[in-house]
Amino acid sequence: MDKEKIKEKILEKIEGIEIIDAHEHLEPEEVRLNQKLDVFSFFSHYTKGDLLRAGMDEEQYKSLFNHDIPIEKRWKLFSPFWEKIRYTCYSKSVLIAVKKFYTYDDINEKNYKDISIAISERNKPGIYRKVLRDTCHIKVALTQCQRTDVDRDKKDPILVPVMPLLYKLPNEITMETISDLKIKSLDDYLEKQKTYFRKIKEEGAVGVKAIAYPNIEPYGEPDEKKAKEIFNDLKTGKIKKTHIINPLYYFLLDRSISLAIKEGFVIAVHTGYWGDFRTLSPLHLIPFLMRYPEGKFDVYHLGYPWLRETLMLAKGFSNVYLNFCWLHIISQKAAKEGMDEAIETIPTNKIIGFGGDYLAPALEKVYGHLTMAKEDIAEVVAGKIEKGWFGFDEGLHLIQKYFYTNPKDLYNLNC
């Protein structure tokens, strides 16, 4: 049997498998229900990046979501840019979702109003369960929206919180930060951090995420003395704020990781693509991996564009897990190449296959992304089966691990 036929057979077998969605930014359902939605809701979140790179400016983008502007006028603005971005992976996720939930093969002049009416009419209580549980077969989605009250159904929640690593502390620490938190000393902050971790654990959080994790000086050592000097300078007004890379932030980051690990949290890490991605190299994690071998570090997005470097982290460190969240909609080619090499280099328990990485207005795109993830992983596994790397049943077993068992075990989920 050739690769394409094996892939088709795999996709048939995994159509209805249970999924653990290993990273979202979905707010509670009521946030979505309280929003005005139309066809442009499909172009919120990551699709914004493609539109801006195609030449749309920020004010034009914001106007797409201004319902005081007639939809015809917004469409006229949007349509030339839609033609420029329709072949990106971000847009592929949109079109898959529109086809699945609203039966249209495309978004165009003829149907954008009908799609807008449909999405608005169907934005009713139960939409999360309809999309995530009934359609995507997602048992649990780990969501990071900076709150723990994400799901009212305590007996069978779909959303499980992952919270920020640092308690109310940006990477640029200011006099106002210290004043607002009523911090008297570094020890005082760390006590607040301990209390924060205990509180969010009681409220159901299973991990903590560092949003700008490697914005630190690579390979430096935490220096408590320098950290205290900067803290005192802020408190006395000698300096107004810290630089984004500074000993105070690095010291608090390091201590917070230590505290989080002691509380049993997985440390989720954004690496790679975002803004000035030079500061987000996954290699900046190495000092933490070496200092905290007892921890569990969930490295997001396979460090794109540093795929091979990120694979090397999981190859070289027992405390690293590789999360393919977001990657399938950045580049399916990259996701497939990363998965193909991961199978050859990484123990099977360290690979997490999917995380949609969307906000509430883009809910339906979780299905689009999941469909692409299944395509990618099925194609890679089919290629390995064709080459005799393993058999068909073994391939299905691996897919089950990537989509369900591995994230369940890593985050110790009760599902």
Image (cartoon, grey):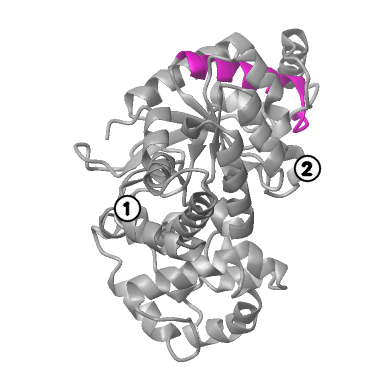
Q: Is residue 81 above or below residue 220?
A: below
What is the three-letter code of the residue carrying label 1? Glu
Element type where label 1 sits in the image: helix
- What residue is shown with label 1? 29
Magenta range is 240-262
Query: Percent position (x, y) of residue 116?
Result: 39, 78
Of the 4 image quadrants, the one containing the C terminus is top left
Q: At 45% from the left edge and 43% from the top edge, which residue is drawn?
A: 145
1 or 2: tag closer to the N-terminus? 1
Q: Within 10 angstroms of label 1, few (less than 14), some, or many (20 or more) residues? A: many
Q: CA distance from mark 1 to mark 2?
A: 35 Å
Q: At 46% from the left edge and 31% from the top edge, which residue is drawn?
A: 349
Q: Is residue 212 magenta?
A: no
Instruction: Tell me if residue 192 can be seen.
Output: no
Query: Percent position (x, y) of residue 188?
Result: 56, 11
Magenta region, main secondary structure = helix
Does 404 sit left or right of 275 as displayed?
left
Does 146 sit left or right of 292 as displayed?
left
Q: At 67% from the left edge and 47% from the top edge, which residue is drawn?
A: 304
Q: Is residue 326 above or below residue 9?
A: above
- What residue is shown with label 2? 278
